[in-house]
């Protein structure tokens, strides 16, 4: 079945540091790919998405590119802020359902 | 804006009790989902529904059942709660099953 493998956490960065959270997927066909963010005490919110190979999703300074050749969708941000502290989930969509990674806790310290 | 609401943010129940978790969405979405979220395990799909009165088992349906009598409402039922069902429960809805899902705020259930 489909699976999403996400970089283990937790990750702690200083403010303005560069962020990468790795995500790879295994699926039949080419699913849509997503990054969700969960702030403390809240549900998941869509951060960005890509629906086909070479698409780049971007939002709030975060970016991820759908790489078919490496089956990856790594999340990046050039300069993180304390307000980016949250749990990040990678997800992949098939015709039946979405499959999520296990989540990566990010803490940004001043 | 799509809104997905869940009946309770926090719930405390005793072992053996029957528990109902309610989820309502206001965007006429066909598909609705129930997940549980546990540290280190991410989100695991319990059940989903793609139409009124239709349901399909997810990855971990044991100990749970669901009800979808109206399009906007999807209920998760724990017939006899057990301590290993202590978790965060998240409801979501979407227009199509492989597209963006909209999540509710979650219900943190504690079973004593």
Image (tube, rainbow, N blue to C red):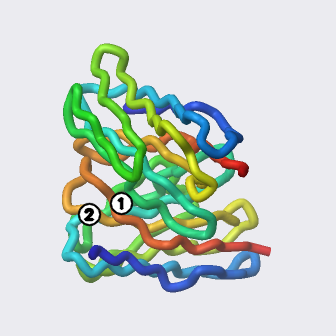
The answer to whether tags 2 and 1 share a subunit is yes
Query: What chain does badge 1 belong to?
Result: B
For residue A83, above or below residue A93: below
Q: Which residue corresponds to the image point at 39% horizontal and 25% vertical from the top-left? A: A72
For residue B110, above or below residue A4: below
Q: Nearer the viewer, residue B17 or B85?
A: B85
Q: Position of residue B51 (x, y in %)?
A: 21, 67
The residue under label 2 is B31
In space, the residues marked 2 and 1 are separated at their CA atoms by: 7 Å
Say if residue A1 shows up in the picture.
no
Q: Is residue A37 left or right of residue A8?
A: left
Q: Which residue corresponds to the image point at 35% horizontal and 21% vertical from the top-left? A: A71
For residue B89, above or below residue A79: below
Quadrant position of residue B17: bottom right
Number of numbered discs on residues = 2
Looking at the rendered image, the quarter that the N terminus of chain B falls into is: bottom left
Return the residue found at the far bottom: B7
Q: Secondary structure at mark 1?
A: strand
Quadrant position of residue B102: bottom left
For residue A20, above or below residue A83: above
Labels 2 & 1 near each other (Cβ < 8 A): yes
Say if residue B8 shows up in the picture.
yes
The residue under label 1 is B48
Q: Which disc number belongs to residue B56?
A: none
Q: Secondary structure at mark 2?
A: strand
Q: Which residue corresponds to the image point at 68% horizontal and 48% vertical from the top-left? A: A107
Q: Is residue A46 left or right of residue B69?
A: right
Query: What chain does badge 2 belong to?
Result: B
Q: Is residue A76 left or right of residue A64?
A: right
Q: Position of residue A38 (x, y in %)?
A: 53, 58
Quadrant position of residue A66: top left
């Amino acid at each position: 079945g489909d699976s999403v493998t996400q970089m283990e956490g937790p990750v702690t960065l200083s403010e303005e540091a560069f962020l990468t959270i790795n995500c790879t997927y295994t699926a039949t066909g080419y699913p849509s790919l997503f990054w969700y963010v969960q702030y403390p005490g809240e549900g998941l919110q869509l951060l960005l998405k890509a629906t086909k190979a070479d698409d780049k999703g971007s939002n709030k300074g975060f970016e991820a590119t759908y790489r078919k050749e490496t089956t990856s969708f790594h999340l990046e941000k050039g300069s993180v802020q304390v307000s980016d502290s949250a749990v990040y989930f990678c997800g992949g969509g098939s015709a039946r359902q979405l499959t999520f990674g296990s989540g990566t806790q990010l803490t940004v310290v001043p | 804006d799509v809104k997905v609401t869940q009946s309770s943010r926090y719930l405390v129940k005793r072992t053996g009790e029957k528990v109902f978790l309610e989820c309502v969405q206001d965007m006429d979405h066909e598909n609705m989902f129930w997940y549980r979220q546990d540290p280190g395990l991410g989100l695991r799909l319990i059940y989903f529904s793609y139409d009124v009165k239709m349901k399909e088992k997810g990855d971990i349906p044991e100990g749970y059942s669901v009800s979808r009598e109206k399009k906007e409402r999807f209920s998760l039922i724990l017939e006899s709660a057990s301590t290993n069902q202590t978790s965060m429960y998240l409801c979501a809805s979407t227009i199509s099953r492989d597209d963006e899902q909209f999540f509710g705020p979650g219900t943190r259930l504690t079973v004593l």
